[in-house]
Amino acid sequence: MESYLICKPLSIEGFSASNHRKFRYHSRVTGAALALVVAAALIHAVWNALAKRAQDQLVFLWSSVSVASVVLLPVGLSRLPEGGFPPAAAPFVVATIVIHALYFFALGRAYRHGDFSRVYPIARGLGVALVPILALVVFDERLSPLGTLGVALVVAGIGGFHLTSGAWSGAVSRASGTGTAWSVFTGLTIAAYSLVDKAGVGHLHPLPYLGLMGIGMSALLTPVALADRRALAREWRLNWRTILVASTMNLTSYLLVLYAFRLSKVGYVVAARELSILFSAFIGSLWLGEGKLAPRLAGASVVLAGVVCVAFAR
């Protein structure tokens, strides 16, 4: 199921009708994959900011994902193959349910104890750094030199984002702090579910895959969410509109990523998705009031350069 992000250059002599069709196909794959990932990045940054602004971040995350999953599951089940649920997909569905439950639990704790402008880049950046390395071992996905450079630039841009914004120095000085610890754990779960889902959607269509993941993850986190019923009631009373908005965004953003996984290498998709770091700079500064905008944009050019390299890698 491996495909290129962009076609291999063709000579004039070798540009036959067949090669022309291949060129057009790979170009469409490139445009489709990038469009899906950029849209997912923007949506992802926005709903994460909504979760950060909640009264109880974990309750908010559980509520929004549960609502989205209830709506999505019937649609997803309608896309099951004629033979029913394929047994080969079961290990991946179970694994992604467990990992996503850990992910949302850790993310809620990280946002409770840390700033959005620090938690988000640490978690997303660690996922980018680990996924291509693990994908080499698991999928034997060997990045091209340009693709490798692109991933490295994305990671470097994330580091530069922290250094210029001053968030990194604060994170280092409080490396044992609760917020930073949960951010790191969140990054580990991001790398884990990215690899599992890359393989999982090869056995099951993304819609039923995502619907089953959402329902399963919601069920696992239900005891945690119901442990404080006052917090749950308060969250819905104060933020029910925002919960419904987020419910249309959180699983939708990852559904776009799952489709992108079908078009491109996992390392490329996860790296390009980190455009959300750029969007989070604007959100953190202009919406959440966490500091000046200019320092948070210092690493943006490096991140964008990395994304361009990844997008046009052969």
Image (spheres, rainbow, N blue to C red):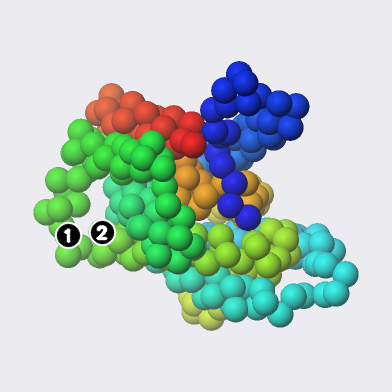
Q: Is residue 52 visible?
A: no
Q: Is residue 135 above or below residue 220?
A: above
Q: Which residue is mark 2?
A: 180
User: Badges 2 and 1: C-beta atoms under 8 Å apart?
Assistant: yes
Q: Nearer the viewer, residue 76 or 286?
A: 76
68 sits to left or right of 194 = right
Residue appearing at x 41%, y 32% in the figure: 309
Residue appearing at x 63%, y 26% in the figure: 14
Q: Is residue 60 above or below residue 95?
A: above
Which percent across, then down, holds residue 248? 66, 49
Q: Which residue is mark 1?
A: 175
Helix, strand or loop at disc 1? loop
Dot 1: within a 10 Å radius of its alpha carbon, few (fewer than 14), some, or many (20 or more) residues?
some
- C-alpha distance separating marks 2 and 1: 6 Å
Which percent across, then down, holds residue 11? 57, 23
Which percent across, then down, holds residue 30? 59, 35
Q: Is residue 281 above or below residue 126?
A: above
Q: Is residue 245 visible?
A: yes
* Mark 2 residue type: Thr
Residue appearing at x 37%, y 29% in the figure: 305
